[in-house]
Every structure is written in C-alpha cells, then in structure tokens.
Amino acid sequence: MSIPEFAENSGRPRPAPAAHSQTLSRGIRVLEILADTAEPMSIVALAAALDVHRSIAYRILRTLEDHGLVVRDPAGQVRLGARLAALARGVSRDLQAAALPVLTRIANELGMTAFVAVLDQGEIFTLVSIEPRQAHATVAQQPGTRHPLNMGAPGIAIQSGLSATEWAALGQSETRRSEAGEVAALGYASSHNEVIPGLSSIAVPLLVPGDSPASLAVVYISSRHSPADIGAVLTAAARTIVAEVS
C-alpha cells in the first residue's frame, strides 16, 4: 500500500485525484472545439482534433446530438446546437450579438417585447429577448421559454421556411399550420390568444445560413400599429441581423 501524500503545511493526507469519465471529457472537448471555430466541422476533422478514431467521435456526436447540444447540417457538418443556450448564454453568441441592438431598437420603436425564437428539438425556444424601456404594460418573454411549434406566430414563421423533408424529420404529430403557407404572401405570421391568453404576436422568418431555423418576433397586449406595419419593421430588422451574422 502506498504512503498517502500530505498537503503542504497541513499534516492531512492529500486527496487522490478524482476519477473522471473519459467519454464525458471528450464530449466537453467537442463542444469547446466547436465553440472556438468559426465554421462547422466534419466528423473527420473533429476526430483528428480529439485524436480519436472516427467511430469514437461519431458515437460522442450522436450522444450530444440526442441532447440537442450539437446539430448536423445536410452536408454532415457539425455545429453547436441551440439547446446550449439554456446552459450558457455564450451559445449562438454571433446571432445574439447581432440581434441584441436590433431587438432593443424595435422594442422601443414599437413599444413591445421583441425576441428571437429558434427551433429546438421540435419546440420553439426563446434565445434572447428585450423589453421596451417605456411602455404602459410590457410582456416578459424570458430566454429559455419554450412552447410547442404549432402554437403562436414564431412557430408559424419558422414552419413557413421548412421543407417537406425537414417537417417530416421533426416527427410532429400535428399537421403543419395552414397559416405557414400564407407567410410568403403576407410577409409575416400573426397569432392571438394562443401561447398566452390575451396576448398577440407577430413574427417573421429569420433565415441565418448554417444556423437553426429561427424567427424574429414581438409579443404585446395591444398596439396602435397595424400587423402589416409591425411585419414590415420586423422584416427589415431580420435582414439587418442576417447581414450582420453572414
């Protein structure tokens, strides 16, 4: 039996190094690697960065993918997933950084809460939100808030940009909202009394290349602005965000 090491100036045995999970450590390292790179990575590149066989990297990625921490695009390129935003606000930092000043401007211009919603594992996830500085009554839309894809304007706007294949891959039990087909003609999606009773929402698609399907939206109790005017403001704001991120 080995003699226990003693902590300096204490006289007490120094604890042995705690055992750790190599698989968990590698999974965390994958997230760190993806966070440090500006572009999505292939499984081959990730395996090389981890110094493991591709089959091991694939199993790690499948686990992270099951939990929504990473996603793969149709070309098989891997990037961080939106679910990480529930764990740390650093996730989707480019989108958040680009959206924050725009959200602040439109929230104060329209006098209503503005937010970015993303599609995450078949649900709508609020990534970032801003409430207006001056308003008689505001609606809190906290980051991390979730609601079903088939409820509310943000989900309708996101549905409008999904292909039939993408919709089928979600495995939704409900059919796609008929209003999703009208978004292109109207320029926006609208809802009332759906997610939260008494509240209205207007949303437009936020199509950021390589990122999760998203929408730019506002939620409010009442407004002097028409839905068409709100939709026009959001459409212009979405273009600004996409140009900043791209």
Image (tube, helix red, strand yellow):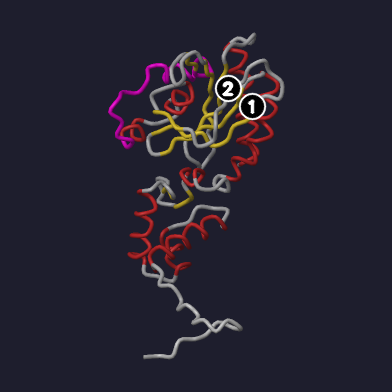
Magenta stretch encompasses residue 71: no
Badge 1: how crowded within 10 Å, few (<14), some, or many (20+)?
many
Q: In this view, does 138 lie above or below 144?
A: above
Quadrant placement of the N terminus: bottom left
Mark 1 to mark 2: distance in Å? 7 Å
Q: Where is residue 8 in the image (x, y as percent from the top left)?
A: 59, 83
Task: Name the residue type under label 1.
Answer: Glu
Tell me which label, 1 or 2, sits earlier in the chain. 1
Residue appearing at x 44%, y 49% in the figure: 69
Q: Position of residue 10 (x, y in %)?
A: 58, 81
Q: Do the residues labelled 1 and 2 touch (CB within 8 Å)?
A: yes
Residue 36, disc? none
- Secondary structure beneath label 1: loop
Task: Name the residue type under label 2.
Answer: Val
Q: Badge 2 is on which residue?
A: 139
Q: Give the range drawn in magenta.
A: 169-189
